[in-house]
Amino acid sequence: MRRCVPFFLLLSGLLLAACGDDAPSAPSAPADRPDAAADAAEDAPLEDAASPEDVLDSPDAAVSPEDASAEDAAPDAALEDAALEDAAPDVTSMEDAAPGDDAGSAGVDPSRPGGESGVVVSEVVSRSGRSIPVAVHVPGDAGARAVVVMLPGFQLETRRYLGLVEHLVSHGFVVVRADPPGGLLDVDHTAMAADVSAVLDRVLDPAAPWAARVDSARVGVMGHSLGGKVAAMTTGADLRIGALFGIDPVNGGDPFLGFTPTRPDVLPDAVAGRAIPMGFAGETLNATSSLGPACAPEGMNFEDFHAAATDAA
């Protein structure tokens, strides 16, 4: 029986916990309702920082949430415009993380907030005429940290997942929120996966302001729904990725044409050949539907990703 690993421990390599033969249990509250924390987050002004490097090097760097209004579904125009027009990345801050167990101590409880805080550096990565908004959440403490790239569900933005992102940061992870572009009718899964690799190029750039805080040997990618599929596609093609976690990943195609070159069938190939830690969490309530297409159809949901991960650690 393969093991399905809790995400926080999977990436840090602290522990592998068996889920049993039943479907994986649902993630904690931030993953069950990725927009819940964002609904409660307040807008925070941009800090007047001399440079991202100065803020990252400050031992007293605090963190406060970015604009995470759940009612504003449009892209963060301020972030996008600033990053496109100005090569210097923006820096914002988030509220101090709630105290919890030291992420480096024995017996850490991953369900509780850790004790770290940090800063957010916002940029836009460009690739083949595509612009990918990126927010790099960097823990304030010095030292190279494991990296997690977070990808959103279809027509969602990663700021809807701030509760989960901030929780990971509080445990010492560098979390990269990436939002590959894709319209309602012209979304290209293949292009989105290439976007993620371009984001990794930037994240692992030795000249990036956060370079000293990133451990390039410990890179994971996670995604929700469509983001889970794109995360798996990127994992299959980009050997820099050493861990994969899918939250209700869906191996979907075109609703009318089925699988196409831009919305391909990625199972089992995307995950079958990678002998790295992988975890897939989901539910079966939306596996079938009598009123229209199922949200996470049977035959292309998290169970199928898990079944395909035959070489996963």
Image: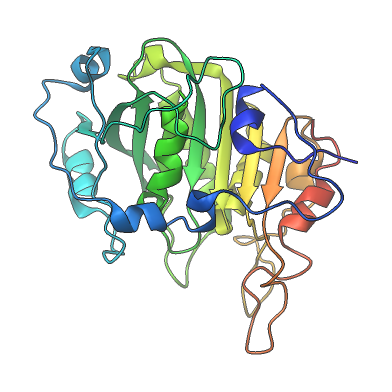
| Residue 221 location, quadrant | top right
Q: In the visual, does 212 lie left or right of 305?
A: left
How far across and down, in percent of the image, does residue 129 sit? 36, 48
Front-lying residue, 180 or 308: 308
Front-lying residue, 78 or 108: 108
**Residue in view at x 67 percent, y 51 percent:** 281
Q: Can you see residue 241?
A: no
Q: Can you see residue 289?
A: yes
| Residue 290 location, quadrant | bottom right
**Residue in view at x 39 percent, y 37 percent:** 166
Quarter occupied by the N terminus: top right
How far across and down, in percent of the image, does residue 101 sit? 48, 23
Q: In the visual, does 159 lie left or right of 49?
A: right
What colouring does the structure picture have? Answer: rainbow
Q: In the visual, does 276 lie left or right of 62?
A: right
Quarter occupied by the C terminus: top right
**Residue in view at x 23 percent, y 50 percent:** 67
